[in-house]
Image (tube, rainbow, N blue to C red):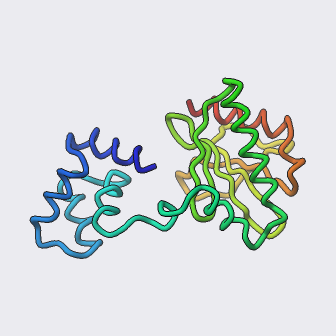
Amino acid sequence: MLEHNTGLLLRRTGHDVAWWLAEVRVTDVVSEADTRRWLAANGVSGYAQNPVMWELFGYPDFFLKDARQLLDGQYADRLNLRPIADAVIALVQAWAESGTAITEIQLRKTYFTLNTSRRKFAQVTPVSKSAVDIFLRLDEAPGGRLEAVNVRAGDPFTRKVRLREAADVDANVAQILLRSYAANI
C-alpha cells in the first residue's frame, strides 16, 4: 500500500515524498487538516497524500504490525472464524504457487484485501461472530452462493459470498474469486 501510494504521488506530481516533505516543512501549516488542504491546493489529492501525511504525522497502527499480528487482531474475539481466513489465504497462496493468479494480500486492522496488480478485487471481512463475508468487485447477477450487497452509490463491491466455516472455502468459492480476479486484471 505504501509503495502504491508513493508511486501514485510520483506519477501524479513528478515529485517524490522527500520533495513534498521539504515543501510542506517550509510552510506555516502544522495541523493534519491544514496540511491536507495545502497538499490539495498544490495538486496532491486522495491516496497520493498519504505517504506525505504518514511521514509527517505517523503511520497507521496497521503499518506498524506484521501480518500475523493484524490477522490475530481481526479474529481475537471470534477464534472460530480464523480458520476461514486461513483457508482463503491458503487458496490465494496456492494460486500463486501454481501460476493460476498472482494476487497480493493486504492486511488492515479489521479486514484483508485481495488485489491484482491493477486494483482490489475482493475484501475478506469478519462481519459477525458467526460469519465472514468476501465482498467482490464483480459484475455478475446474484445467484447460488453469490449474493447482492446493498452499497453506497459508486461502491464497486456489489457482490458477496458468506462463509460460516472453513469448508465453505470450496471449489465454488474459488471459481467465484477467480472470476472476480479476472475481471480486475
The residue most toward the top is 99
Above or below 56: residue 48 = above
Above or below 83: residue 89 = above
Residue visible at 69% across and 25% down?
100
Q: Which residue occupies the foreground of this view, 75 or 45?
A: 75
- How far from the left and from the top, in percent, is residue 56? 28, 66
- How far from the left and from the top, in percent, is residue 53? 31, 63
Residue visible at 64% across and 45% down?
122
- How far from the left and from the top, in percent, is residue 11? 28, 38
Above or below 38: residue 145 = above
Residue visible at 82% across and 53% down?
163
Q: Is residue 174 left or right of residue 22?
A: right
Residue visible at 90% across and 47% down?
167
Above or below 181: residue 151 = below
The residue most toward the bottom is 31
Q: Which residue occupies the foreground of this view, 129 or 16?
A: 16
- How far from the left and from the top, in percent, is residue 119? 52, 40
On the rendered image, what quadrant is the C terminus found in?
Answer: top right
Q: Is residue 42 left or right of residue 158?
A: left
Q: How many marks?
A: 0
Q: Which residue occupies the foreground of this view, 148 or 66?
A: 66
